[in-house]
Amino acid sequence: MFERLANPKAFLTTVSLDYQKILFPSSFYTFILIVASQFSLLVGAAFADTIVSSTRIWPASEYTRLTLESATSINYSLSLLKNPDRVVLDLENVALTPEIERLPRRIGVDNLYIRALRIGQFKPGVLRLVLDLKTKVVPQAFVLKPVANYGYRLVLDIYPAFPSDPLMAFLNENAIKSAQVNAHANIKSDLKERENVASNRKVNPVTIRLITVAIDPGHGGEDPGAISLRGTHEKNITLAIARKLKAKIDAEPNMRAALTRDGDYFMSLQMRLAKARKLNADLFISIHADASFKPYARGSSVYTLSERGATSAAARWLANMENNSDLIGGVNLKNKGPYVKKIILDLSHAGTIKYSLKLAREVLSEIGEINQLHKSDVEQAGFAVLKSPDIPSILVETAFISNPDEEKKLIDSAYQDKMAKAMLVGIKRYFAKNPPLSHSKSKIVWLE
């Protein structure tokens, strides 16, 4: 101490250092460094580019969907340019990662609307996606909030500006069959006319209207439906069974079928209903595979719309789950499609529900011959997809995909075929007792 006093400068330096050690120990310096580094990370994150974790493209005849998934919401701007026609999607503060760079290679040559996709840095902070078009389109973009296993999703839907009429396409597809059926009916009519020529009784020409069945494979695209422990997706099972049922119906001389979706893409519940109505369908059958938190739950079920609420808590739970498909699959709540008008539903249409119950009981009876029934009677609940005021509609839960034993059945082609055949027999039994609710004055004739 006295030595330090002899050197005033050294003394002051020593006192200053000692004073700092008292007020600012070494641990405090460490604390300051940590706070500063964390603050810099937070500030950097605020201005960092958003990372797109997953990209998906769902091509379909109705429209093409492009999805960009990320942990945070993406700000965007959408524009439609001409000469040549192209859609431009500008993304703010989104990183150009290998995941995004893979997008152009995912545009197939058979895509009906998109010729090519180009990606580049338009300007600092703006990543630009340019879609070169094959035809005139109506683009829609919207952001979906996190739901189920998805994060934020920026969705770009490309609709045709002039969509084809599903009824005309359906009629053209079945023109040959209709001609054959009418020719056969007219031969029978001619024979009757010859038999009655002596009595001068006039036989009116027979007009045939083929019975039309709308088959709805549940879920699709962004909406996988239930997923088994082994990774089997409900959407794939429902489409496989629906295609088999369509083939069997089309093989009948007086019937024809149409699918609401014929590929792995999302269709909103409203679009499914609208398509069935545009086709003048005589009945609507929605195909699903059940799921439960209880792995031992098993059996097939058939549901219809209820006027007075669900017939059981399980039916109510299932209806809520199925009605959430639009949230998972992704519906633009501001605009549900350029050519899908809102269907005004008469939920008190007791007549249609009565016929739906008759159809459901016939189908349930046949399904019970090939699989255990989960419920011995038809269940009822508020299924949105069954809310058509003038088309008898049922929902078939083919089996429990959450049950390992029943999952094996569902992925088995032979079981799928049996299920489709059981549905067909039930449908035919229903129509044998209940002629179709007429959409026209054409006479329905069952051919031998």
Image (cartoon, rainbow, N blue to C red):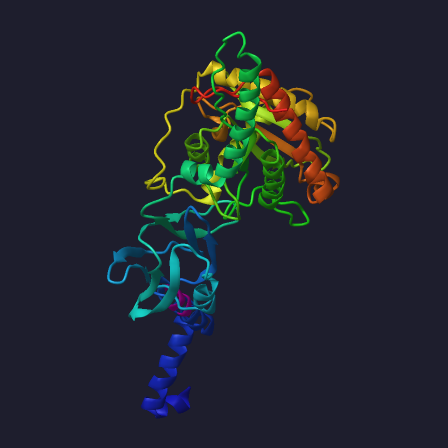
As drawn, the residue found furthest toward the top would be: 199
Name the residue located 60 percent from the left edge and 43 percent from the top edge. Answer: 234
The magenta region covers: 37-42
Left of 44 or right of it: where is 445?
Answer: right
Question: Residue 295: x and y, percent?
Answer: 71, 38
Q: Which sits in the foreground, 91 or 163?
A: 163
Q: Is residue 378 visible?
A: no
In depth, the one of 27 and 278 nearer the eye is 278
- Residue 302 placement (x, y as % from top left): 62, 26
Q: Is residue 191 visible?
A: yes
Which part of the image, by quadrant, shows the C terminus? top right
Task: Please give the count of numbered marks on the rendered protein.
Answer: 0
Left or right: 230, with 17 as reference point: right
Q: Position of residue 245 (x, y in %)?
A: 61, 36
The quadrant where residue 368 appears: top right
- Does 81 appear above or below 295? below
Query: Does the magenta run of residues contain 63?
Result: no
Q: Quadrant of the N terminus?
A: bottom left
Q: Nearer the viewer, residue 228 or 435?
A: 435
Q: Does 38 appear in magenta?
A: yes
Query: Which residue is found at the position 47% from the left and 16% from the top?
Result: 204
Magenta span dominant secondary structure = helix
Residue 83 coordinates in the image, percent (x, y): 24, 62
In this view, 294 is above or below 232: above
